[in-house]
Image (tube, grey):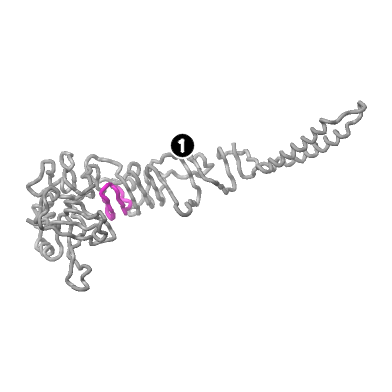
């Protein structure tokens, strides 16, 4: 019985003789072989061991290692690549390689076992565990060859497999792989999160290639699959409106984003093109909630044209100090034409008016006419002074109006 590369090839192509069987067996016998994961060390008790796996050879324990006691043929392996953390699950099969270890200074032949990637036996990002050996399949785990090629990670009767993947990993039946297009580079997590380095691909099932030219670049970061096609083997594409959170870096693509609000009535002319119609390079961030937090310095928003704050309910500003430095400010309407009054100058002019009127009234309250018909000289003088003051105040009324700020 063949295992590793040979076994995968024979499973998918049982009627085709693998011409490279001998070469593969030679590689397995020398430095490259496979192992079934029994445990993954992630608890941090030994920092140097984090990411290491305990495995058994596929030959010695082809069954479900989560339901049988490990045989005496158990070994350890460490990650070959330390900068990219891609740890396997229990019951997944990994590629193993023997390479030099830290003792190579003393013994040039000193080697450790390192593991590479998980074998994609189901061709699915969620998991690639093989829990049961040939002849031990539970009825709910039976799959046809076509289902295997499609990469179905779940039972044919929609029952989730009752096996152990680890201490916290729970299999889900609503995670789908992404549909690739020519030239794509895609990184997929196990939970519907992904990064696609892609491009415009005309006449293919995606929602970013309605216009533009084949090869126009696009990058999509997605966290949380937003659609459930009820068949985990189907390949899907990202959905900008239903995925839980996304960042789109586009070049010429028209992205069908359904924004919460597209009201641009504050613009007198040249309002922004709505995001779903824009066809030049842009970055779109969308999720149920967005938080931009600066823990040490500023948040800077800079735009060649305008910065639009658009909401269904309200725009609120809570700050000890709010400064708006603008040539013209319109409050209440883009057509506001009522100038605001300058507070200090208005108060000063009103104080002058009140002071003069108060003095005039004080004189009026004590003046008498003796004998009757005699001119009231004091009242005449006071009235003339108030009149002069009122004329001056009237001349300054226009200066109270703001030249730049308007309301309705």
| Left or right: residue 352 compared with residue 375 | left
Vertical comparison of 375 with 307: above or below? above
Element marked by disc 1: loop
User: How far from the left and from the top, in percent, is residue 328?
Assistant: 59, 45
Vertical comparison of 237 with 354: above or below? below
From this viewpoint, is residue 5 visible? Answer: no
User: How far from the left and from the top, in percent, is residue 101?
Assistant: 21, 67
Residue 262 placement: quadrant: top left
Between 126 and 302, the residue placed more toward the observer is 126
Between 342 and 208, the residue placed more toward the observer is 342
From this viewpoint, is residue 83 visible? Answer: yes
Residue farthest to the front?
Answer: 45
Between 118 and 62, the residue placed more toward the observer is 62
The span shown in magenta is 179-203
Q: Quadrant of the C terminus?
A: top right
Q: Is residue 353 magenta?
A: no
- Residue receiving disc 1: 313
User: How far from the left and from the top, in percent, is residue 332?
Assistant: 56, 37
| Left or right: residue 339 compared with residue 306 | right
């Amino acid at each position: 019985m063949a295992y590793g590369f040979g076994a995968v090839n024979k499973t998918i192509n049982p009627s085709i003789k693998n011409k490279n069987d001998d070469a593969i067996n030679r590689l397995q016998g020398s430095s490259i072989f496979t192992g079934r994961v029994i445990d993954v060390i992630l608890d941090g008790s030994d920092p140097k061991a984090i990411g290491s796996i305990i495995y058994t050879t596929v030959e010695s324990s082809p069954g479900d290692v989560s339901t049988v006691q490990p045989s005496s043929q158990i070994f350890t392996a460490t990650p070959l690549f330390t900068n990219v953390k891609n740890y396997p699950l229990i019951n997944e099969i990994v590629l193993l390689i023997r390479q030099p270890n830290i003792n190579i200074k003393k013994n040039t032949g000193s080697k450790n076992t390192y593991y590479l990637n998980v074998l994609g036996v189901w061709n699915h990002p969620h998991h690639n565990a093989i829990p049961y050996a040939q002849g031990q399949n539970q009825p709910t785990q039976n799959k046809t060859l076509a289902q295997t090629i499609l990469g179905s990670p779940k039972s044919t009767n929609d029952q989730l497999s009752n096996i152990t993947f680890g201490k916290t990993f729970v299999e889900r039946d609503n995670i789908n792989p992404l549909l690739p297009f020519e030239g794509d580079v895609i990184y997929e997590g196990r939970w519907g999160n992904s990064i696609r380095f892609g491009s415009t691909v005309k006449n293919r099932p995606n929602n970013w290639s309605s216009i533009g030219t084949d090869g126009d670049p696009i990058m999509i970061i997605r966290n949380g699959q937003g659609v459930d096609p009820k068949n985990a083997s189907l390949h899907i594409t990202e959905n900008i409106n239903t995925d839980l959170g996304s960042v789109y870096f586009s070049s010429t693509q028209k992205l069908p984003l359904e924004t919460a609000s597209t009201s641009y009535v504050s613009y007198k002319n040249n309002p922004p093109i709505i995001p779903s119609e824009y066809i030049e390079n842009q970055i779109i961030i969308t999720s149920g909630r967005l938080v931009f937090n600066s823990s040490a310095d500023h948040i800077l928003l800079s735009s060649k044209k305008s910065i639009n704050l658009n909401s269904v309910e309200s725009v609120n500003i809570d700050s000890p100090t709010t400064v708006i430095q603008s040539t013209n400010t319109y409050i209440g309407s883009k057509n506001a034409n009522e100038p605001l009054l300058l507070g200090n100058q208005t108060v000063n002019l009103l104080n002058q008016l009140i002071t003069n009127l108060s003095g005039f009234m004080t004189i009026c309250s004590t003046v008498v006419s003796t004998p009757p018909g005699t001119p009231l000289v004091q009242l005449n003088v006071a009235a003339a002074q108030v009149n002069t003051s009122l004329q001056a105040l009237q001349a300054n009324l226009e200066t109270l109006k703001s030249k730049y700020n308007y309301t309705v």
